[in-house]
């Protein structure tokens, strides 16, 4: 038995001291990468109706509406005395939710996510959807989208817009709850 013990110990030492084998796996090249420019295509090639798409764009333009962050920001739905996230919830609850086939639990989760999405809102969320939407809102207002929004609102001064974004960054510092990717 003692001999077997020493033999196994010797085998472990020898195998443990041998160089590790490296495994090289080929990484496939993507079939498309937009280094030379983005591909273009027709709406029909992507399964969309170009007439319907053009009509939607025309309708948005005709109503003086630009693509906004949420329903409560559309001129058709704005109510000056109601905060936009709360108004967005009201619009979805009265005009959209009745046309959706959701369980009561999913409807509550959807309405919470809409109402609590604003990055300035510090109320706790109960659902992961609400947390994800709020943190997406935080990220959106820290990058180039924020710069473009600030610049569009005015003043048309890049330095002023940048300072506004930096100020916003300090306002949300320490409020991210989701872990960083790659940790």
Image: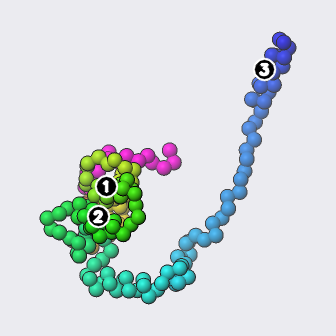
Circle 1 residue? 112
The answer to whether marks 1 and 3 mark residues whose Cβ atoms lie closer than 8 Å is: no
Dot 3: element: helix
Of circles 2 and 1, the one toward us is 2
- Which quadrant of the figure has residue 54? bottom left
Task: Identify the residue at horizontal 83%, vertical 11% (top origin).
Answer: 2
Residue neighbourhood size for the residue with mark 1, other residues' Cα within 10 Å, grouped as few (<14), some (14–19), many (≥20)? many
Circle 2 residue? 93
Dot 2: element: helix
The answer to whether marks 3 and 2 mark residues whose Cβ atoms lie closer than 8 Å is: no
> What segment is highlighted magenta in the picture?
167-183
Of circles 1 and 3, the one toward us is 1
Would residue 27 appear left or right of 165 to someone viewing this image? Answer: right
Q: Looking at the image, is 46 positioned above or below residue 158?
A: below
Q: Nearer the viewer, residue 177 or 56?
A: 56
- Which quadrant of the figure has residue 1? top right
Tell me where residue 85 appears, x and y as whole percent: 25, 61
* Residue 36 visible in the displayed image: yes
Of all residues, the one furthest to the top in this rendering is: 2
Tell me where residue 182 appears, x and y as whole percent: 51, 48
Q: Tell me which secondary structure the magenta stretch mostly adopts.
A: loop
Circle 3 residue? 9
Mark 2 or mark 1, earlier in chain: 2
Mark 1 or mark 3, earlier in chain: 3
Would residue 153 appear left or right of 31 to someone viewing this image? Answer: left
Distance from label 3 to label 2 (Cα)? Answer: 70 Å
């Amino acid at each position: 038995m003692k001999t077997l013990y020493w033999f196994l110990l010797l085998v472990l030492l020898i195998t443990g001291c041998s160089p590790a084998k490296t495994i090289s796996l080929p990484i496939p090249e993507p079939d498309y990468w937009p280094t030379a420019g983005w591909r273009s295509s027709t709406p029909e090639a992507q399964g969309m109706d170009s007439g319907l798409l053009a009509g939607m764009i025309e309708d948005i333009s005709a109503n003086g509406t630009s693509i906004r962050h949420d329903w409560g920001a559309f001129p058709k739905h704005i109510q000056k005395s109601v905060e936009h996230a709360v108004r967005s919830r009201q619009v979805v609850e009265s005009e959209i939710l009745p046309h959706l086939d959701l369980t009561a639990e999913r409807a509550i989760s959807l309405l919470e996510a809409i109402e609590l999405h604003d990055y300035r809102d510090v109320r706790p969320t109960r659902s992961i959807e609400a947390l994800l939407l709020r943190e997406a809102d935080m990220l959106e207002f820290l990058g180039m989208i924020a710069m473009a929004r600030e610049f569009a609102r005015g003043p048309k001064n890049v330095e002023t817009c940048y300072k506004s974004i930096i100020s916003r960054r300090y306002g949300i510092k320490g409020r991210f709850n989701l872990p960083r990717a790659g940790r």
